[in-house]
Image (cartoon, rainbow, N blue to C red):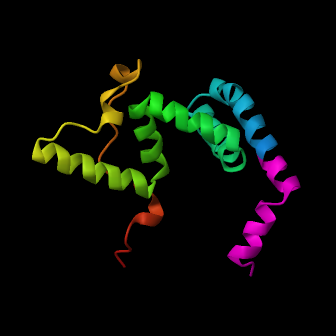
C-alpha cells in the first residue's frame, strides 16, 4: 500500500506534474469536441481538465482566485460543486448574517457583470451515491 507521503512525493515529481498539466490542458482543449456529443459531456471533460491544471499550476491558481474575486457568485458555484469545507463554512456565516440582518461582507457586495444571469447555488452540496447511509 502506498502511503500519503509517497503519493505526495510522486505527484510533486516534475515529470508527473508536467504530465498532469499537459493532460489537463488537452482535456480542456478537447471539451468542445465532447460537447458536440448529446449530453453534458463537454462540461465534465472541461471540469476534469481544469482541476488537473489547477492542481499543478500556480499561475492558473492565481487567475482562478482573481476570477472568483471578480465573479463571487460563480466562485460560490465552483466551491459548491467541489464540496469545499470553506464554502460550507462561508454559507453558514452568510446564513447567520442574513438572520441577524447584517449586510453581506464587502467582497460579496460587488457582484460581477454576469451575476444577474447566475442563480445562487443550493444550500447543500450535491449528494453522491457514496454519501448515503446504508439501509441494510
Q: Position of residue 27 (x, y in %)?
A: 73, 37
Q: Is 117 part of what is drawn in magenta?
A: no
Residue 125 visible to the viewer:
no
Q: Residue at x 62, y 42 (%)?
A: 61
In screen coordinates, is 89 left or right of 67? left
Labels in figure, total = 0
Screen quadrant of the C terminus: bottom left
Q: Residue at x 37, y 20 (%)?
A: 117
Screen quadrant of the N terminus: bottom right
Quarter where residue 66 is shown: top right
Residue 85 versus residue 123 in the image, above or below: below
Residue 90 versus residue 32 in the image, above or below: below
Q: Residue at x 44, y 32 (%)?
A: 74
In screen coordinates, is 86 left or right of 63? left
Q: Nearer the viewer, residue 104 or 126?
A: 104
Q: Position of residue 57 (x, y in %)?
A: 71, 44
Q: Main secondary structure of the magenta part?
A: helix
Q: Position of residue 109 (x, y in %)?
A: 30, 29
Residues shaded magenta: 1-20
Q: Residue furthest right?
A: 15
Q: Position of residue 118 (x, y in %)?
A: 37, 26
Residue 135 visible to the viewer:
yes
Q: Nearer the viewer, residue 23 or 96?
A: 96
Q: Nearer the viewer, residue 47 or 102?
A: 102
In screen coordinates, is 7 left or right of 114? right
Q: Residue furthest top?
A: 113
Q: Residue at x 24, y 37 (%)?
A: 104
Q: Is 6 part of what is drawn in magenta?
A: yes
Quarter where residue 103 is shown: top left
Q: Residue furthest bottom?
A: 1
Q: Residue furthest front?
A: 106
Amino acid at each position: 500500500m502506498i502511503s500519503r507521503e509517497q503519493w505526495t512525493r510522486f505527484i510533486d515529481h516534475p515529470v508527473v506534474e508536467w504530465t498532469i498539466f499537459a493532460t489537463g490542458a488537452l482535456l480542456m482543449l478537447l471539451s468542445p469536441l465532447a460537447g458536440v456529443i448529446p449530453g453534458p459531456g463537454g462540461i465534465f471533460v472541461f471540469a476534469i481538465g481544469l482541476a488537473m491544471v489547477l492542481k499543478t499550476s500556480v499561475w492558473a491558481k492565481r487567475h482562478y482566485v482573481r476570477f472568483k474575486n471578480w465573479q463571487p457568485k460563480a466562485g460560490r458555484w465552483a466551491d459548491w460543486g467541489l464540496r469545499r469545507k470553506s464554502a460550507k463554512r462561508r454559507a453558514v456565516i452568510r446564513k447567520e448574517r442574513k438572520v441577524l440582518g447584517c449586510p453581506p461582507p464587502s467582497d460579496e457586495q460587488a457582484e460581477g457583470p454576469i451575476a444577474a444571469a447566475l442563480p445562487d447555488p443550493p444550500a447543500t452540496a450535491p449528494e453522491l451515491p457514496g454519501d448515503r447511509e446504508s439501509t441494510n
